[in-house]
Amino acid sequence: MITDISKERQTEILGKALDWFSEHYDFEELYEILTDKLTMTDDEIDFYGFELSDFNLKSGASMVHLHEENDDCYLYLSKSIDLFRMAIAYQYDIKNKIADLKLESFASAFENASVTNHLAYSVVSRNLSEYDDVLNLYQLDFENNTLSVCNKNSGEWSSFHLCDIGEAIDEATFNDKLPIEDKHSIFIQQLIGKEITETDEEESESPSMRM
């Protein structure tokens, strides 16, 4: 009969148990199990490779999901940006580099951005109204060429084709002498009537959950 187990062996067993949990539960369920059932702190969860420290969110944040056919990247922006500035980042810093760079490299297109993970984005996306610190969520889908946004105030997703986003930005920024407020207004006016209408099959799911 075993009367003592080394700390190394205990750590190995716990690590394998957590690996099993991650294979059998979705991200939100796993986080609840680790924090509620096992009473683990975020630092302890990070130690075992789950990287959940991003739940300590700062005021006025945004989160971004970048998606390609075989790649996904999640960004946390400690300073929230509106749709206009998100569109500028796409049109001038991302659009012409998609084929050449990994998605994580596009964090440099945003101020105060850091790479996070699917778990953090998924949990906030499902409960945005409960996270006072996150003002909006974005999804840049390069596979389907769409930009989607969910603002805390509305709580609903809106989606636009990237070609329409690009054209709206080009029109809004054509005259460099215009004040930023006027550029923003032109951008919004250009998008009127161009929001993508979801099909009946898609109405029950947000863009982030259809991936």
Image: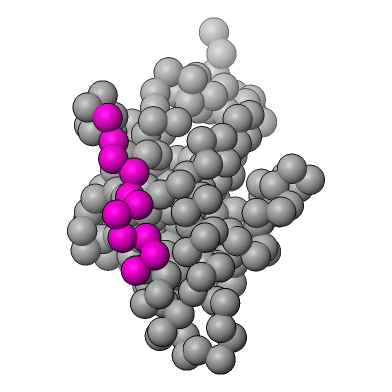
Q: Which residue appears at 41% of the width and 84% of the height?
A: 182
Residue 29 image position (x, y, % from top left): 33, 31
Q: Say which of 47 and 51 sits in front.
A: 51
For the N terminus, give its image quadrant. top right
Residue 99 seen in the figure: yes
Above or below: residue 120 compared with residue 81: above
Residue 205 image position (x, y, % from top left): 28, 33
Q: Quadrant of residue 21?
A: top left
Q: Which residue appears at 67% of the width and 50% of the height?
A: 104
Above or below: residue 118 compared with residue 112: above
Above or below: residue 83 compared with residue 202: below
Side of 208 relative to 197 (left or right): right
Start-end of magenta stretch: 189-199
Q: Quadrant of residue 129?
A: bottom left
By secondary structure, the bulk of the magenta-drawn segment is best described as loop
Q: Say which of 25 and 160 sits in front.
A: 160
Residue 164 image position (x, y, % from top left): 47, 54
Q: Say which of 126 and 32 sits in front.
A: 126
